[in-house]
Image (tube, helix red, strand yellow):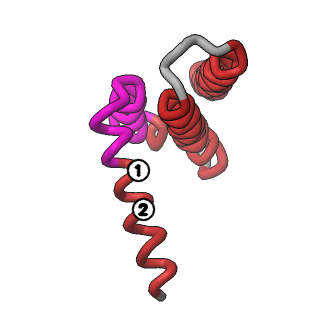
């Protein structure tokens, strides 16, 4: 139980840090809160609803990982370093791909709903 309590505490600290320090996380969280009711309305069944909401959570997950990479890289050095720059760019690319995935899922479900 102690290990679970510690994990929950560390996770809460991580969410708080992301919310306080990461504008992109706040924007994506806002979209998640706004779009969950839309997903519940738009999805024709539980699988579609899960895909719509899951795609939004996936964006947040990747954003958290990218933010962790950036924070760690900045803790190592603020000077320009080729490998650190590459790591940050790769994290950013991962976020972009997660957003493309979310837009694709939402578009596919939306198109099938209205056709």
Residue 79 position within the rendered picture, expressed as x and y whole percent measured from the top left: 53, 15
The residue under the point 35% across, 55% down is 13
Residue 63 position within the rendered picture, expressed as x and y whole percent measured from the top left: 53, 32
Q: Quadrant of the C terminus?
A: top right
The residue under the point 54% across, 32% down is 76
Residue 56 makes an appearance in the image: no
- For the magenta stretch, what is the residue range? 16-38
* Residue nearest the viewer, comparing 77 with 39: 77
* Residue nearest the viewer, comparing 5 with 34: 5
Residue 87 position within the rendered picture, expressed as x and y whole percent measured from the top left: 68, 24
**23 is higher (above) or lower (below) than 38:** above
Which residue is the extreme one toward the bottom? 1
Which residue bears the numbered disc 1?
14
Q: Disc 1 on helix, strand or loop?
A: helix
Q: Are marks 1 and 2 in contact (CB under 8 Å)?
A: yes
User: Does residue 90 show up magenta in the picture?
Assistant: no
The residue under the point 42% across, 78% down is 5
* Residue nearest the viewer, comparing 101 with 108: 101
Give residue 54's quadrant in the image. top right
Please rate how many residues cluster around mark 1, counting C-alpha atoms within 10 Å: few if below 14, some from 14 to 19, many from 20. Answer: some
Q: Is residue 111 left or right of residue 38?
A: right
Q: Is residue 109 left or right of residue 79?
A: right
Question: Residues under labels 1 and 2: Cα distance?
Answer: 6 Å
The overriding secondary structure of the stretch rendered in magenta is helix
Which residue bears the numbered disc 2?
10
């Amino acid at each position: 139980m102690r290990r679970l309590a510690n994990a929950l505490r560390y996770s809460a600290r991580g969410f708080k840090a992301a919310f306080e320090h990461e504008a992109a996380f706040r924007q994506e969280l806002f979209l998640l809160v706004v779009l969950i009711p839309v997903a519940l309305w738009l999805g024709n069944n539980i699988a579609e609803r899960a895909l719509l909401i899951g795609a939004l959570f996936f964006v947040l997950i990747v954003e958290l990982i990218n933010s962790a990479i950036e924070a760690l890289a900045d803790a190592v050095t603020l000077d320009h370093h080729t490998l650190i720059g590459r790591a940050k760019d790769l994290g950013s690319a991962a976020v972009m791909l997660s957003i493309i995935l979310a837009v694709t899922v939402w578009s596919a479900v939306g198109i099938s709903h209205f056709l």
